[in-house]
Image: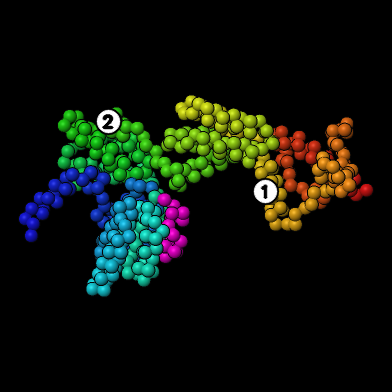
Amino acid sequence: MNLFAAEEEGNREKARPLAARMRPRTLDEFVGQRHILGDGKLLRRMLDADRIGSMIFYGPPGIGKTSLAELIAKHTQRRFRRLNATGAGVKDVRELLAEAEKYLTAHGKQTVVFIDELHRFSRSQQDILLPDVEAGTISLIGATTANPFFSLVAPLISRSQIFEFQELDHADLLQLMNSALQDVERGLGKFNVTADDDALKLIATLSDGDARRSLTALEIAALSVASTTMHVDRTVAQESLQKRVIRFDPNGDDHYDVASAFIKSIRGSDPDAALYWLARMLESGEDPRFIARRLVISASEDVGNADPQGLLIATAAFQATETIGMPECRINLAQATTYLACAPKSNASYLAIDAALNDVRTQTVLPVPMHLRDKHYQGAERLGHGVGYQYAHDSADGWVQQDYLGVNKQYYEPVSRGHEAQFREWVDKLRSLRTEDSAE
């Protein structure tokens, strides 16, 4: 028996950061995730029925995935064991599973196996979990910040209930911080520090839904004034937060979701929204060349011939980005973004090439008409290649009645917006002439 165990535990507790000390002790203390844990919601029903199975908790850091896993084990009176995929190997996983099976046999109770950063496991490590998950030997709770449909093996996904966690809102973060200020046993209550409402709101705003980040900033602010003013104002809060760090993973959902919002805002002709998403990508550390490439694509996919100048501007912005880099290229990117957002829109070229590609891939390949074939070699005329071809520039209108495909197909349908409206008028006129001549 260790006579100093209580003292040692107390020392460890003092050293833990505020965010760790303020972890909820019961489900009633848990803040956030009401969309899955509120009354009548799926996870709450599973807990009330004591049918938890295996689950994947998916979402950004600092929003309660680990805390909720521990509370689930406690609430359902199951044993809790934890692994972090960044440091655990196959041997560790096998030993834990064998231990869980022995415990189930001896005590008739499952072990909740919580694996943090589950997406860090290789496919073979994930596969090791499958037999015990399927047999019900363990209740697996895997936490991941990466989209499970891309980062986890399909058999594991099919055997698990996936719960997507959301960032905490301002009210949640304010509740946590106020509780921490008042809690004498675990929080900052013993320091008798007070805080202005606008200081707490600033921390909540700049924490981006991350409880750990907000409590860490509050702890720094409170301890910095504990021996002086005993009061946290907006200035102290700002100093405690320092530079805002925006979550960014070049291979994660945020990367693709923000880029998607950026392009869709341009497509929807909202320059203000497009500029916001551009700013967020730049501030988070996104490669500006990636943004420039997306602009070049959007110039043809979304603006197209409604404003052909858009592609020139987007290409110029791409070249400028390659040449001068950040921070100056932000101006070039902003110019191209606002131009494309304000330009008339047409996806006619995009739809046309996809329709033509579909025909090439799924229908009989059309032969090149004889009069369009290459005739620049000896003997071509004997084969009939190029015979009867009419040179369009010899006509006063720059157009001649001639078959260029061999079948009647219409892929390009110009819209009645911007410059493409002129294209539509011209194309409709020529198609009408072809139809009249073919009828004769």
> Mark 1 — residue?
354
SS type, badge 1: helix
| Residue 349, above or below 129 | above
The magenta region covers: 146-159
Per the image, is 153 magenta?
yes
- Do residues under tags 1 and 2 come within 8 Å of each other at their CB atoms? no
Q: Earlier in the sequence, mark 1 or mark 2?
A: 2
Residue 159 pos. (x, y %): 42, 65
Image point 89% across, 43% down: which residue? 388
At which x and y percent is residue 49?
Answer: 34, 67
Residue 214, percent from left and from top: 31, 41
Q: Which of the pair 242/128 is nearer the observer?
A: 128
Determine the image quadrant of residue 230.
Answer: top left
What secondary structure predominates along the stretch shown in magenta? Answer: helix
Count of numbered labels shown in the rendering = 2
Q: Residue furthest front?
A: 378
Disc 1 marks a residue whose amino acid type is Asp
